[in-house]
Amino acid sequence: MASSVKNAVGAVVESKECYLSAYAVKGVPTSDHLKFRTVSLPVAADSIPDGHVAVELRLVSVDPYVRTRMTGRKDGLYFPPFELSEVITAFGIGRVISSRNDKYAEGDIVMNPLFPVAEYCVVPLDFLKKVDTGSSSIALPEYLSCFGVPGFTAWLGIEVLGDPKPGSNVFISAAAGGVGMYAGQLAKLKGCRVIGSTGSDEKVKLIKEEFGYDDGFNYNKETDFDAALSKYFPDGIDLYFDNVGGKMLEAVLNHINPHARISLCGMISQYNTVWTDRDGVRNLLNMVGKEVRMEGFLVGSYLHRFNDFVNDMENYLKQGKIKSKHKIYHGIESFVESLGSLFSSSNTGKVIVKV
Amino acid sequence: MASSVKNAVGAVVESKECYLSAYAVKGVPTSDHLKFRTVSLPVAADSIPDGHVAVELRLVSVDPYVRTRMTGRKDGLYFPPFELSEVITAFGIGRVISSRNDKYAEGDIVMNPLFPVAEYCVVPLDFLKKVDTGSSSIALPEYLSCFGVPGFTAWLGIEVLGDPKPGSNVFISAAAGGVGMYAGQLAKLKGCRVIGSTGSDEKVKLIKEEFGYDDGFNYNKETDFDAALSKYFPDGIDLYFDNVGGKMLEAVLNHINPHARISLCGMISQYNTVWTDRDGVRNLLNMVGKEVRMEGFLVGSYLHRFNDFVNDMENYLKQGKIKSKHKIYHGIESFVESLGSLFSSSNTGKVIVKV
């Protein structure tokens, strides 16, 4: 991180920022696609636009959906694709170093779903939200995980779309990931039987011992998903929280119960190929015979439920019923490696870059 | 049809019935898979079991789902597969010729979703329903279409699952078929813009002129579905009533609007192949980005809504707002040809066998 900056008139900081240098159509994005440049950024209050703040970034959330914006194509994206040479944006937390708005002052800690992946930035207030660090014992990374997008996503997929009942058979893919770890714990709190799939034996151990899953399997080892689901779901699947799509989704549809729900959160197994090369799901007909409801969702459409979510989560957290795990990468330039790691089974919990 | 039978003590009728002689794993079922045999059936009241009726079949509904029961496999079926040499069952209407229950008398007209495909039968009362032909001007075939499974299916997919709004862009595949013709008309009555796909220019003309569709296309001619949907849905699709699945469903997902609904009624394009050979849908990821809800349904789960449906439908019918079309085949042995015809683009409206 660059050294601390006095908010003096005329202050300028050197800021390293990450930009798209080439479209990543296929495969895992690397330093061939994401490069860094250093810009001189005027950050003094009198040199930033009205209604803006200058922010020193602290934490950057590394989320799979960001990868879908790097293809230059508009196929099934949450946000428009990044343009070449455009700075990458991500959910983040930072400290205000100067402000041209009365609501924000130097020293405020702020969140923003669209912070530039950079050491410093000057941003408008549109999506900014103050983090009340004073009255809370919540550690800063929790704001990007438990109370952030992963926690809210998990809560929506389970509580709002999933309609779980005590005893329901629930399956979570990417079960040890930023979203999966909360989804599994929330389903357990509803009295469900919860099984997870994840990418290593170590992580299978973790979801059982740390996150309370009833069982789990390593999809890199039990590669016949159909056989694995037969084994772990002798009574079929009532709710599938899908983080991966593709072959796993297809296998699930062969074990799905009548009136089951499938919450589509994302499909990480499919992000590194163009859509025409993606795994086709051939058994959607099962959705008719079993009257399955499958629904995609984005957190942005459920902001009216955010307070319900925070209340639920705080309640659980106070009772020690929700645990988190973070994988921290260090330095803004680790963003490239940390993003790639999302596709490699190598992480556990929420991936965060400490700037 | 066999000649009328006196319900005399000891009466026996010769009845031709259709049975499965070989599993139809792939392709359109033919007389290689469906054969007929004549059985001698005691139909006198004193020779049938208590709580049963003997019925002379009049009309047999020919529905695509019946084909999915002929594979010997249990993949995504509505009902268990037919066993070899088992008599095929189908929705039908017949006349009671003798009864061992006080509620039914000779001459009653009855419906049953599980009538044997036969000239005569002896059945329990479980699924039997009396048709009140006295107080109604409704023609008998309408009970198998408008007020039967196709009408109810269309109503559920549009009104209950589809959530159409005035101005919504609605797409119906198999638009001139038994279900499609009602789905399109119901969506029009909700003030939607409705486009249909069907298998011939003649049927495109029909859905526009007879059923009030705003437009339609012949999928055998406009074979690039993606291009066709671009042309007919410049503002995207808000509701898709899917009767076909496969490539058309995939194309729809490339034109789907945020928060769209997809009602999965059946997938006729996929019934003649084993599931591993079916067309995979590769762009389900679009369901996440567009927050699409896709839901399969069976009429049997919505019987609590049947009266609402009948009220709606009767109301529309009295105002002349719903039209029907039937394709009638003659003689029980035409069941094989009529079933095959469902997969050939050759029919319009509800296919019925007049026994």
Image (cartoon, coloured by chain):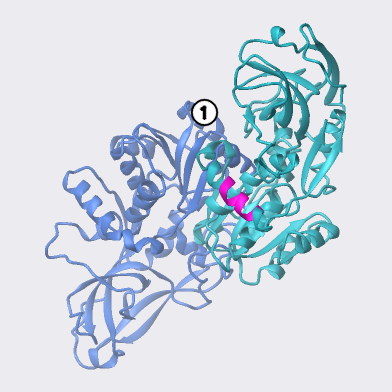
Chain colours: A cyan, B blue
A134, A115: nearer the viewer = A134
Give amino acid for label 1.
Ser
Callout 1: 10 Å neighbours few (<14), some, many (20+)?
A: some
Q: Up-down: is A160 above or below A115?
A: below
Q: Up-down: is B33 above or below A103?
A: below
User: How many marks on residues?
Assistant: 1
Is B209 placed left or right of B233 in the picture?
left
Asked whether residue A340 is in view, the answer is: yes
Q: Which residues lie in the magenta part?
A: A310-317
The residue depicted at 70 percent of the width and 11 percent of the height is: A45
Label 1 belongs to which residue? B230
The residue depicted at 24 percent of the width and 87 percent of the height is: B100
Q: Is residue B289 magenta?
A: no
The residue sitting at the left extreme is B135
Quadrant hosting residue B122: bottom left
**Residue at mark 1: chain:** B
Q: Up-down: is A91 above or below A166?
A: above
Give the quadrant of the C terminus of chain B.
Answer: bottom left
Is B279 placed left or right of B215 in the picture?
right
Q: What percent of the width, then of the height, locates residue B115?
A: 35, 73
Q: What element carries label 1?
A: helix
Q: What percent of the width, then of the height, locates residue A173?
A: 70, 54
